[in-house]
Image (cartoon, helix red, strand yellow):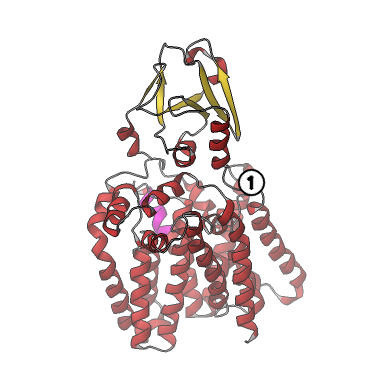
């Protein structure tokens, strides 16, 4: 095994080691509960129908997870699918980066990927994002392999990667568009542009079988929570993919601008050297620009996690910027690389999902039954689905309006603390519950609350 493969193996194993422990122990959060309900469908047609009805992504990841469930894998352990994707992703980033920078800088790009806050967070959960990032890198490597040595087998692989990516997440189309633009605009791709384009179109044609469901999903308006266009979230994407340090602060704005400038500088450095570097630059910047342009046009689909596909290429571009620094200032380069890695590592340490499973056990231990309301503070969506999943018999928990009647006891969740509060007055008159959302089972709610119709909120969840 040569040095490059050893580095790939080491970086891949490190990425798995970072993701694996929490994958086994972390509670399911809101979106993961939605995934778990899909994976529990008894038949494949019902799975496809459930994805079309409740999700905003295509079905490939769910199909893979469902096959694992059919083989007897517990729900929690299906997260291994994302963990494995994260390990392979980090290793392949080293392989991609080696094509544009020396091995030490390629290893740095792999380490950035291994410790990226977004990639780590999504690399240990029941969602499709880590697979999206992996397939984006696979797409780039297959395109470069086709340019270097065209063959029918590589074109079939390219078509398969396009189909798989488009059936994993709709944002993959931004990467496909960047590849097509590179094929037709870059002189280095001239010899294979027709064959490679044909392969991409074949893959897109295979994925188009899901198109009718795409229209149905878009009509459900699942991106209602995304606000009007703003420049700051766009500028923040390159930095926020790797660190949440100083998020939503003045210092955070400085970090965001610095991250974008470093990415643009790195893209310029790698583009200046080769057609390979120009492909990396296109895949780092074009999806970000395309998604921002659609958002500015009024299509509210822009979200940081949806742009996770550019993270590997931002890592390679960053390594390219460091590699371009003159050797005489090598200590400064090492210090900058160490600081970037430290920001990523600090960002993932101490972060995690609230222990909804422990909250549910604490509610039961305090005497909760399905006929009693629960008061939560903050975004009630964060609590509703996980508590429904972990509480006995999986009750429905709808936001409820307080009525004039008196609830003799209410179970209150503040952060991770669970308390039973006994009352002698209506809920709306109790100061300690001011600002709380009351969750109650619509079929068993006491007379002191009236649940809002669940169907109305299902479209928003």
Q: Nearer the viewer, residue 297 or 408?
A: 408
Q: Could you tell whether 199 is left or right of 250 in the image?
A: left
What segment carries the magenta color?
289-295
Q: Quadrant of the C terminus?
A: top left
Tell me if residue 294 is in the magenta stretch: yes
Residue 324 shows in this picture: no
Residue 372: % across, % down: 46, 24
Q: Secondary structure at mark 1?
A: loop
Q: Nearer the viewer, residue 413 or 283?
A: 413
For the image, the number of numbered tags is 1
Residue 325: % across, % down: 68, 72
Q: Quadrant of residue 159?
A: bottom left
Q: Residue at x 42, y 44 (%)?
A: 229
Q: Nearer the viewer, residue 80 or 312?
A: 80
* Secondary structure, magenta segment, majority class: helix
Residue identifier under label 1: 246
Callout 1: few (<14), some (14-19), or many (20+) C-alpha neighbours within 10 Å? some
Q: Residue furthest left?
A: 212
Q: Quadrant of the N terminus?
A: bottom right
Measured along the vertical axis of the image, is residue 104 above or below residue 18? below
Q: Could you tell whether 340 is left or right of 433 in the image?
A: right
Tell me if residue 334 is in the magenta stretch: no
Q: Residue at x 57, y 66 (%)?
A: 315
Residue 228: % across, % down: 40, 41
Measured along the vertical axis of the image, is residue 261 above or below residue 53? below
Measured along the vertical axis of the image, is residue 143 above or below residue 428? below
Measured along the vertical axis of the image, is residue 81 above or below residue 358? below
Residue 296: % across, % down: 38, 48
Q: Residue at x 36, y 86 (%)?
A: 153
Residue 53 shows in this picture: yes
């Amino acid at each position: 095994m040569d040095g490059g493969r050893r580095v790939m193996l080491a970086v891949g194993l490190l990425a798995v080691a970072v993701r694996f422990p929490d994958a086994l122990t972390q509670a399911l959060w809101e979106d993961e509960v939605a995934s778990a309900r899909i994976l529990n469908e008894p038949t494949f047609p019902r799975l496809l129908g459930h994805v079309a009805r409740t999700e905003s992504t295509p079905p490939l990841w769910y199909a893979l997870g469902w096959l694992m469930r059919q083989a007897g894998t517990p729900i929690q352990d299906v997260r291994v699918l994302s963990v494995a994707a994260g390990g392979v992703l980090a290793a392949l980033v080293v392989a991609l980066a080696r094509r544009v920078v020396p091995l030490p800088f390629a290893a740095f790009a792999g380490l950035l990927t291994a410790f990226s806050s977004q990639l780590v967070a999504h690399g240990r959960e029941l969602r499709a994002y880590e697979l999206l990032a992996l397939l984006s890198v696979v797409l780039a490597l297959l395109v470069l392999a086709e340019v270097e040595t065209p063959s029918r087998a590589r074109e079939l692989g390219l078509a398969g990667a396009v189909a798989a990516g488009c059936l994993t997440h709709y944002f993959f189309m931004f990467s496909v568009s960047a590849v097509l633009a590179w094929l037709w605009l870059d002189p280095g791709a001239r010899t294979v542009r027709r064959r490679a384009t044909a392969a991409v179109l074949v893959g897109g044609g295979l994925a188009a079988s899901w198109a009718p469901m795409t229209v149905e999903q878009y009509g459900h308006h699942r991106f209602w929570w995304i606000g009007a266009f703003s420049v700051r979230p766009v500028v923040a994407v390159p930095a926020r993919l790797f660190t949440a340090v100083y998020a939503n602060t003045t210092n955070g704005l400085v970090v965001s601008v610095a991250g974008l400038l470093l990415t643009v500088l790195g893209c310029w450095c790698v583009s200046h050297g080769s057609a390979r570097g120009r492909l990396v630059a296109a895949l780092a910047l074009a999806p970000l620009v395309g998604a921002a342009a659609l958002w500015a046009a009024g299509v509210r689909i822009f979200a940081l996690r949806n742009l996770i596909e550019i993270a590997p290429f931002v890592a390679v571009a960053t390594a390219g910027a460091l590699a371009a620094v003159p050797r005489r200032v090598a200590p400064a380069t090492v210090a900058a690389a160490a600081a970037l890695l430290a920001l990523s590592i600090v960002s993932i340490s101490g972060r995690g999902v609230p222990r909804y499973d422990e909250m549910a056990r604490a509610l039961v231990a305090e005497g909760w039954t399905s006929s009693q309301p629960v008061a939560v503070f903050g975004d009630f969506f964060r609590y509703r689905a996980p508590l429904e999943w972990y509480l006995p018999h999986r009750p429905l928990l709808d936001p409820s309006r307080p009525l004039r009647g008196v609830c003799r006891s209410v179970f209150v969740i503040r952060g991770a603390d669970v308390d039973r509060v006994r009352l002698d007055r209506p809920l709306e008159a109790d100061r300690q519950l001011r600002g709380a959302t009351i969750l109650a089972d619509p079929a068993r709610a006491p007379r002191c609350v009236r649940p809002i119709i669940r169907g109305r909120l299902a479209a928003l969840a």
